[in-house]
């Protein structure tokens, strides 16, 4: 028995042939092979699109690559990592204008991403420390320096709680433990709001401490020093905005938080009313930096609330039937990353045969029966029309019409015979 053919026969007339080995289902997705290389014309068009200034950008290009090479030599990174970082740096700069970023930041970020791509084990703070020492040789630092470790709300929270409750006061350990437990859980709940992308870590911690003190009825003296927002590189309006964001979360979605179920809803509402009155008295805006003139230009794209009747969260039986579903683009689908370009092309050729509509023109000869001819009918009119007057008056029309049905000369002979017989009858009379 001959082995099966590796290439299945092409379908005829656009209809796929049944094949048990071919899976039946939707298309396999969009196989996009990124362009690793670009032409000189494509690069110039990209630079023209972003407003490329040749005299200035050439300097940034050379300085950025030099910085990547210097950091690479300082950390003794392999050359392949340097090459990958340089490619990332160039591709980023031909796509985004240079006035939107600092070229040094892009160079360091490109080197960090190249380390991940080439499996070069280096931490981000090691690269930042090497770049800092090259930029400022007189201010030498180590990777363990606090400068390269951004502050997290949890670490700042513990330090500020220790400042609020000194260790010398041993009689209030239970109160301190409860305060820290509520504040720490609140630092987790704050990530369920948009506050972390609006405020700094100091602002978040100050808002958490103030709200915790209000909920636990802590002495006002403990939080008086924290209300000096300028000392903590923030403003009072930002702190109050974060407090109201947390209160909105606890009053609207208490069961989805850690702190909400621990307090009565009436207590939360009372604190929220007090904060709103404080914002009104201090003449702060609910949202810092809000512009009333710009607000009408922003379209209202708020999604449905999780508890609404038409939300997918409460109607799992209607998938895809929601009118607010985002429209899919024509080229959107399952995105896959392909490493073997030849294999992707073979797969595309194989799949396209079953989804492309193909048409063929064929000529077919069909015999049709010709019907028999109908009998000939002639109408012979003989008429003698009299004078007709204008205005619709007319005399009678005298005439004689003979309907003759027949074919050939037989009909003419019949008429001639009838005429002779009538003349004979007149002569006899």
Image (cartoon, rainbow, N blue to C red):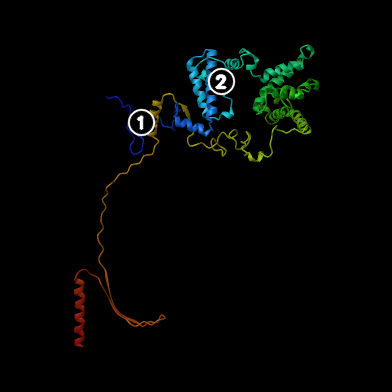
Decide: is 369 above or below 60: below
Crowdedness near tag 2: few (<14), some (14–19) or many (≥20) residues, C-alpha within 10 Å: many
Task: Give the camera-side residue of 19 and 201.
Answer: 201
Q: Which residue is mark 2?
A: 108
Residue 36, how many percent across, how many down? 45, 26
Q: N-terminal of the two: label 1 or label 2?
A: 1
Crowdedness near tag 1: few (<14), some (14–19) or many (≥20) residues, C-alpha within 10 Å: few
Examine the image and state in which quarter residue 6 appears: top left
Residue 388, how many percent across, how many down? 36, 82
Task: Give the camera-side residue of 18 and 358.
Answer: 358
- The alpha-carbon separation of the residues under discs 1 and 2 comes to 54 Å
Decide: is 290 above or below 142: below
Residue 128, how many percent across, how many down? 59, 17
* Residue at left offset 19%, top offset 77%: 417
Residue 17, how many percent across, how many down? 35, 34
Decide: is 15 above or below 420: above
The quadrant of the picture occupied by the C terminus is bottom left
Q: How many marks?
A: 2
Q: Which residue is mark 1?
A: 19
């Amino acid at each position: 028995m001959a082995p099966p053919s590796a290439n299945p026969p092409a379908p005829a007339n656009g209809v796929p042939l049944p094949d048990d080995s071919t899976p039946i289902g939707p298309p396999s997705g969009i196989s996009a092979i990124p362009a690793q290389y670009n032409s000189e014309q494509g690069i110039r068009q990209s630079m023209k699109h972003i407003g490329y200034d040749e005299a200035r950008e050439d300097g940034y290009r050379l300085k950025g690559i030099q910085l990547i090479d210097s950091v690479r030599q300082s950390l003794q990174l392999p050359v392949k990592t340097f090459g990958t970082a340089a490619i990332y740096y160039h591709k980023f700069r031909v796509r985004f204008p240079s006035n939107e970023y600092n070229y040094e930041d892009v160079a360091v970020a490109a080197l960090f991403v190249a380390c991940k791509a080439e499996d070069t084990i280096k931490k981000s703070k090691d690269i930042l420390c090497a770049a800092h020492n090259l930029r400022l040789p007189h201010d030498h630092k180590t990777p363990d320096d606090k400068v390269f470790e951004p502050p997290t709300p949890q670490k700042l929270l513990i330090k500020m709680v220790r400042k609020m409750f000194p260790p010398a006061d041993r009689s209030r350990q239970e109160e301190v433990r409860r305060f820290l437990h509520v504040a720490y859980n609140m630092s987790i709940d704050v990530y369920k709001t948009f506050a972390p992308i609006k405020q700094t870590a100091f602002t978040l911690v100050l808002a958490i401490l103030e709200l915790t003190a209000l909920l636990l009825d802590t002495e006002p003296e403990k939080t008086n020093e924290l209300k000096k927002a300028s000392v903590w590189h923030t403003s009072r309006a930002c702190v109050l905005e974060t407090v109201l964001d947390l209160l909105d979360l606890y009053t609207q979605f208490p069961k989805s938080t850690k702190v909400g179920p621990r307090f009565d809803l009436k207590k939360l509402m009372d604190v929220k009313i007090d904060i709103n009155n404080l914002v009104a008295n201090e003449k702060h805006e609910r949202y810092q930096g809000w512009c009333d003139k710009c607000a009408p230009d922003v379209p209202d794209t708020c999604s449905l609330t999780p508890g609404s009747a038409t939300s997918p969260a409460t109607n799992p039986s209607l998938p895809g039937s929601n009118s607010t579903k985002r429209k899919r683009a024509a080229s959107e689908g399952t995105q896959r990353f392909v490493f073997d370009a030849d294999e992707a092309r073979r797969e595309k050729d194989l799949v396209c045969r079953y989804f492309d509509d193909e048409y063929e023109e064929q000529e077919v000869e069909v015999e049709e029966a010709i019907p028999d001819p109908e009998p000939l009918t002639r109408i012979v009119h003989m008429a003698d029309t009299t004078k007709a007057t204008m205005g619709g008056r007319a005399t009678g029309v005298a005439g004689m019409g003979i309907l003759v049905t027949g074919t050939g000369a037989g009909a003419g002979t019949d008429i001639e015979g009838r005429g002779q017989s009538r003349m004979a009858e007149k002569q006899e009379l």
